[in-house]
Image (spheres, rainbow, N blue to C red):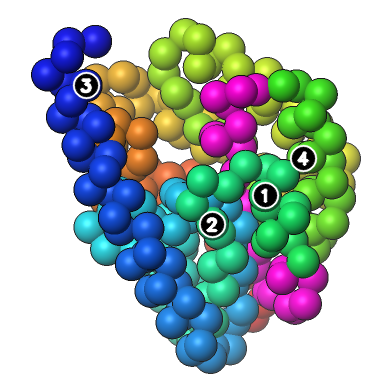
Amino acid sequence: MPRAFERRRRANAVVLNDTLPVNSQWWREQIALTGEIVYAAIGDSAAQGIGASEPGRSYVGLLAEHIREETKRTVHVINLSISGARVADAVDLQLPKLKKLSPHVVTVSVGANDMAAFEPARFERDVRTLLSALPPRSLVADVPSFHFPDGERKVRAANRILHRIAIANGHVLVPLYRTTRRQGLPRALTQVAGDFFHPNDRGYRVWASAFLPVLDRAIAKLS
């Protein structure tokens, strides 16, 4: 990787890092708002919307807006996600809060941060603990495509684990890997923020598109 490119990428990552408290505060303010339909999200920095031009343009924000438009009802968004979260962090820090709620819709997208030091046995244990405690028929996304060979090998192994456990626990799989993978590397490079890891607005629209078919089936049962 050229040094100039890597320096620019790292500088952009620092800029995005500065948005972490801004996005977190924005989502905390959303929790204070009420709504007829309760939508809870478990996840990591992607659920927080890091890389988007504003937090509401994350996939969580886009899905919440879709629920409003389709149901013509108000939506109470409870974004429990934490930037940098691994599956174990979702179990320890997000799941206890979810258990105190009675959400109509639950989305889960976590696991990308586990890939750097991927250990299949630990990943399986943590995924099993998380998914076995979720409300029935939660919308569970698999890990998105990393596009490069080494990352893809780990992601595919992780997704085999995740698929098996999600199905066993009666959840609805969201094909995030397939949706991001079929973008192809050239197009995917136009869908990432300056750190070349987090999605940008265009990328988050792609993520949301993976959720929409199963989300529509979920909200159809609310009417």
Depth check, mark 2 against mark 4: the one in front is: 2
On the image, the x and y values in percent for residue 191 come to 27, 37
Separation of marks 2 and 1 at Cα, in angstroms:
8 Å
Which label sits on residue 4?
Answer: none
Camera-nearest residue between 204 and 96: 96
The reply to whether callout 1 and callout 4 are in contact (CB within 8 Å) is no
Camera-nearest residue between 48 and 170: 48
Of helix, strand and loop, which one carries label 3?
helix
Q: Residue at x 59, y 81 (%)?
A: 37
What residue is shown with label 4?
127
Separation of marks 2 and 3 at Cα, in angstroms:
26 Å
Depth check, mark 1 against mark 4: the one in front is: 1
Label 2 sits on what residue type?
Ile
Q: Is residue 211 visible?
A: no
What residue is shown with label 3?
6
Is residue 23 positioned above or below 149 on the image?
below
Which label sits on residue 89?
Answer: 1
What residue is shown with label 2?
82
- Mark 3: few/some/many CA within 10 Å (<14, 14-19, 20+): few
Separation of marks 1 and 4 at Cα, in angstroms:
11 Å
Label 4 sits on what residue type?
Val
- Magenta residues, start to end: 97-118
Label 1 sits on what residue type?
Asp
Q: Is residue 83 visible?
A: yes
The reply to whether callout 2 and callout 3 are in contact (CB within 8 Å) is no
Of helix, strand and loop, which one carries label 4?
helix
Of the image marks 3 and 4, the number of the one nearer the N terminus = 3
Of the image marks 1 and 3, the number of the one nearer the N terminus = 3
